[in-house]
């Protein structure tokens, strides 16, 4: 069964060119305007966007690189295939595109007029900040990403992540408990 | 003092939370500051365009300079997205016109009391809104029905008060006639008759007033529902598309019921229970002060326990409700997509998915039932403590001759009247919270601004002259423009074709012409009059439209054709059907024009459905006919039948057609090619083919595809 599936996949990969970039030839750089550029196969792309194909399951793999017009230049199979310098530029670009602050404490949770109003403490590079957010349709917008990771999507479109429910303090967990299912 | 437009952003360039300001002033300077420090300054002369680039959970504003390079101006979280779009609009307008036109300061509404931003689309602060005000407003809506509801409520309360006489009569019978063994049969009969009458009159009043009351409260719910529905009909597509159909249906049906129940039933209960409580309290105090104290002794404990109990149970049942919703959603999804499930042979997988969900539901439900079975008897026991105390101390006093037996019986009977309201009062906050949520949601709809407004003195010119788009820009989200600076003129009677890739903005153009949305910038005129100065109804009456996904309402074919002109004569309906080449197939059905078609017209074919839609569009003889991919979902043969009818119909009418199959637009007087929200090319088919631009490439690509299909 597995062999058949691998054979089918390899046939498909053969027929459809995913367009993986050669990690050795990828050269990301910082532009004077504050963006990330890319030199690849003799082309110089002045601003590129890095997008995760599977941001939850494989955040470091299958990274699509698109140009200014959002046209895909190619994909990077794994960021770990890049050199250290290239890896850090790519990571910085991804970090600035995907903003999901890590929640380290839930200070309060209040049900008000059909919205769940939360006071969250987020951590960015060691500094702690308090964030207020309102969540509508908790069934959809407070959801488990995997066994232990929880994502909260607020009404504005911001997203917050609790990396490990098991490591969250008891009071925070108790406040969130009614909304976990 | 220079006029300036400011955008407050909340992240620095390294994505750390920060307080930054992006400022654009009337001299054309753009300045980005964090704190007081400006770290970047540009002038509008250097900039070709500023644009919002959305990320995931964040976004940025980028300045594209004249030399093609780009500069990052600021980063922000999604909370600032709308304001970022507004800022870009102001700067881009200045770059284009050299005029500074800052919009009216429309900052995110903030609560005056607590300074918190309003949540989502709410127009009140969730923490500080005036609860009394909201209830008053809901009561105000009830005013037309108050004549029925209030007197009925008073009589229902009176019927309950009549029941309170029964323990008094019981006491009299025991103390005056039974215990001293002095009473006569007549005296006892008289009191028993009085008891019977009190109950019977009470029941009679209750039955009669309940009928009036229920009628009044149903009328009130109906009124509330109609108010919400009428408002929804008047709202723009822009407002409606912010909410899901389910959300709107819930507001019209469920929220109105919750409000009705709270205002009518809740009001009735509140009045009844409070009056009963006060009356019983006074009777008890007057009868025996000490025993009354005993009755009330466990009240604080009971209240506290009840309140905890309800909160605890509520959370658990809410979880059960969510699990149940999950099961329903899975079931709905699977049944809707059963064809796909079966064709991929995934029945087992779907069975497992559903059984997993039902197992979880069963587990939670069973836990809750066990919990309920444990806690409920405990609560009943707690609320019965007062009764034990009264019996114990009352019995003690009777044995000592300090209390009569009748008084003890009377107290025991009244205790239920004290504890029943208590139970109700404890669950009241939850009931109030639910009702408040529903009330605010209904008022949110009722208070919503109608974006597509009718002017007070509309200029309803005949919709027959030239149509012009003058500098029209528009985006469904202000930060994502779909159309950019569209300038076109369409002569009366012209057949115009709009072509372009998917998502280029073709349908958006006709949405704007139909005034389903208003442009963010520029104007659309008919005969030189801005369509915003016309009555929307007048405009819509003169435009006929056929969409790709035709929606037919449940009803007969006749009703569907006459939908656009309800006063159409039978001849008009048949003529419209003949013009749309629909008559022949209609006549083949057993019931002809009376044939019933279900929701979406499932019982008839795509081509037939489309022909009914065309008949519906032309029955009102529109001056402008819009065909939005009207034939794209049909096979070539059916398309050619419909194309025949369309060719007949479009003669002499201004027609705007969108089609992916470019061959259908070959006869258009002019074609507009839209690319990335702008008019990239215009001209006749031949002119554009000679030009060898985007249109040429699209035609060539389609020819290639057709050839491939022919070969295969």
Image: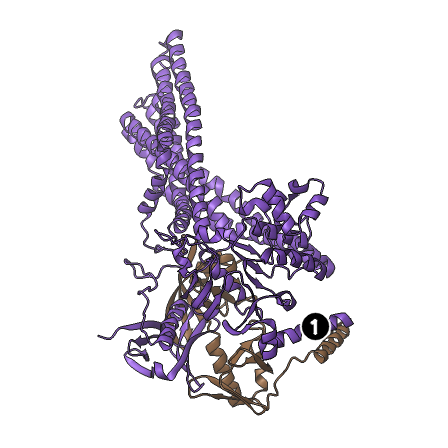
Give the side of residue B307 with respect to residue A28, left or right.
left
Residue ranking furthest to the left? B1
- Report the chain shown in purple: B
As rendered, which of B697 and B221 lies closer to the eye? B697
Residue B585 x/y as whole percent: 70, 48
Horizontal arrangement in the rendering, residue B78 relative to residue B545 (left or right): left
For the rendered model, the colour scheme is: by chain
Disc 1 target residue: B705
Q: Secondary structure at mark 1?
A: helix
Q: Is residue B649 left or right of residue B255?
A: right
The subunit letter for the residue under badge 1 reads B
Residue B509 visible to an observer of this rendering: yes
Return the residue nearer the eye: A171 or B433: B433
Q: Position of residue A68 (x, y in %)?
A: 51, 80
> Which chain: brown?
A
Count of picture labels? 1
User: Residue B694: percent from the left, percent from the top?
Assistant: 58, 76
Q: Residues within 10 Å of mark 1 (few under 14, many from 20)?
A: few
Quadrant (top left/top right/bottom left/bottom right) for the N terminus of chain B: bottom left
Farthest residue, direction bottom: A42
Q: Which one is nearer the viewer's eye here, B639 or B554? A: B639
Q: Which quadrant holds residue B594?
A: top right
Position of B103 relative to A46 (above/below) = above
Foreground: B559 or A74?
B559
């Amino acid at each position: 069964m597995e062999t058949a599936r691998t054979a089918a996949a390899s046939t498909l990969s053969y027929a459809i060119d995913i367009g993986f970039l050669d990690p050795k030839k990828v050269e990301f750089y910082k532009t004077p305007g504050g963006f990330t550029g890319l030199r690849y196969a003799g082309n110089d792309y002045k601003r590129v966007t890095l997008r995760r194909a599977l941001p939850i399951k494989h955040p470091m793999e299958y990274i699509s690189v698109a140009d200014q017009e959002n046209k895909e230049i190619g994909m990077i199979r794994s960021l770990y295939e890049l050199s250290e310098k290239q890896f850090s530029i790519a990571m910085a670009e991804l970090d600035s595109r995907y903003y999901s602050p890590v929640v380290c404490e839930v200070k309060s949770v209040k049900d008000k007029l059909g919205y769940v109003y939360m006071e969250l403490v987020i951590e960015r590079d060691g500094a702690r900040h308090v964030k207020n957010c309102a969540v509508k349709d908790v069934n959809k917008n407070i959801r488990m990403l995997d066994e232990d990771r929880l994502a909260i999507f607020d009404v504005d479109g911001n997203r917050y992540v609790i990396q490990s429910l098991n490591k969250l303090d008891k009071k925070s967990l108790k406040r969130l408990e009614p909304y976990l299912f | 003092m220079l006029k300036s437009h400011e955008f407050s952003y909340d992240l620095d360039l390294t994505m750390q939370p920060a307080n930054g300001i992006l400022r654009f002033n009337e001299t054309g300077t753009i300045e980005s500051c964090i704190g007081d420090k400006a770290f970047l300054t540009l002038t509008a002369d250097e900039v070709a365009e500023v644009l919002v680039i959305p990320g995931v959970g964040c976004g940025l504003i980028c300045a594209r300079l004249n030399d093609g390079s780009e500069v990052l101006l600021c980063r922000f979280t999604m909370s600032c997205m709308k304001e970022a779009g507004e800022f870009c609009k102001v700067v881009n307008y200045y770059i284009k016109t050299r005029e500074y036109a800052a919009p009216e300061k429309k900052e995110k509404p903030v609560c005056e009391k607590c300074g918190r931003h309003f949540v989502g689309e709410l127009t009140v602060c969730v923490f500080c809104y005036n609860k009394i005000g909201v209830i008053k407003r809901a009561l105000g809506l009830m005013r037309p029905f108050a004549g029925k509801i209030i007197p009925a409520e008073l009589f229902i309360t009176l019927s309950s008060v009549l029941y309170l006489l029964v323990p008094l009569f019981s006491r009299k019978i025991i103390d005056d006639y039974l215990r001293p063994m002095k009473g006569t049969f007549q005296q006892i009969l008289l009191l028993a008759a009085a008891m019977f009458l009190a109950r019977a009159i009470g029941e009679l009043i209750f039955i009669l007033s309940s009928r009036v009351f229920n009628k009044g409260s149903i009328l009130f719910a109906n009124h509330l529902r109609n108010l919400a529905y009428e408002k929804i009909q008047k709202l723009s597509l822009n407002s409606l598309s912010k909410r899901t159909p389910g959300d709107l249906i819930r507001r019209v049906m469920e929220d109105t019921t919750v409000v009705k129940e709270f205002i009518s039933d809740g009001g009735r209960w509140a009045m009844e229970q409070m009056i009963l409580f006060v009356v019983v309290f006074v009777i008890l105090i007057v009868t025996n002060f000490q025993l009354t104290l005993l009755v009330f002794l466990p009240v604080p404990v009971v209240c506290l326990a009840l309140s905890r109990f309800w909160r605890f149970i509520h959370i658990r049942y809410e979880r059960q409700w969510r699990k149940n919703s999950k099961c329903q959603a899975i079931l709905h999804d699977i049944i809707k997509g059963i064809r796909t499930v079966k064709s991929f042979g995934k029945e087992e997988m779907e069975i497992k998915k559903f059984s997993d969900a039902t197992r979880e539901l069963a587990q939670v439900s069973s836990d809750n039932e066990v919990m309920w079975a444990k806690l409920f008897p405990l609560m009943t026991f707690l609320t019965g403590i007062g009764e034990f105390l009264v019996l114990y101390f009352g019995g003690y006093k009777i044995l000592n001759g300090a209390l009569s037996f009748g008084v003890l019986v009377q107290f025991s009977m009244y205790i239920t009247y004290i504890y029943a309201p208590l139970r109700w009062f404890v669950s009241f906050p939850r009931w109030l919270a639910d009702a408040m949520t529903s009330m605010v949601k209904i008022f949110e709809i009722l208070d919503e601004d109608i974006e597509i407004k009718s002017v007070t003195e509309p200029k309803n010119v005949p919709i027959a002259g030239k149509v012009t788009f003058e500098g029209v820009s528009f985006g469904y989200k202000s930060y994502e423009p779909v159309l950019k600076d569209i300038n076109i003129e369409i002569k009366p009677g012209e057949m115009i074709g709009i072509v372009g890739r998917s998502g280029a903005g073709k349908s958006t153009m006709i949405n704007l012409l139909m005034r389903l949305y208003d442009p963010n910038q520029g104007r659309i005129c008919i005969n030189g009059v801005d369509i915003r100065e016309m009555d929307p109804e007048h405009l819509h009456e003169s435009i006929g439209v056929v969409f790709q996904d035709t929606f037919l309402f449940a009803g007969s074919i006749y009703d569907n054709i006459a939908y656009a002109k309800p006063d159409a004569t039978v001849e008009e309906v048949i003529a419209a059907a003949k013009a749309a080449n629909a008559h022949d197939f209609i006549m083949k059905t057993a019931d002809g024009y009376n044939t019933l078609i279900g929701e979406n017209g499932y019982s008839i074919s795509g081509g037939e459905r489309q022909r009914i839609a065309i008949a519906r569009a032309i029955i009102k003889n529109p001056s402008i006919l819009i065909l939005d991919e009207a034939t794209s979902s049909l096979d070539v043969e059916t398309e050619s039948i419909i194309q025949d009818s369309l060719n007949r119909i479009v003669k002499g009418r201004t027609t705007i057609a969108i089609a992916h199959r470019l061959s259908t637009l070959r006869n258009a007087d002019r074609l507009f090619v839209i690319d990335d929200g702008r008019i990239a090319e215009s001209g006749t088919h031949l002119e554009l083919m000679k030009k060898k631009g985007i249109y040429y490439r699209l035609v060539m690509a389609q020819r290639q595809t057709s050839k491939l299909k022919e070969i295969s």
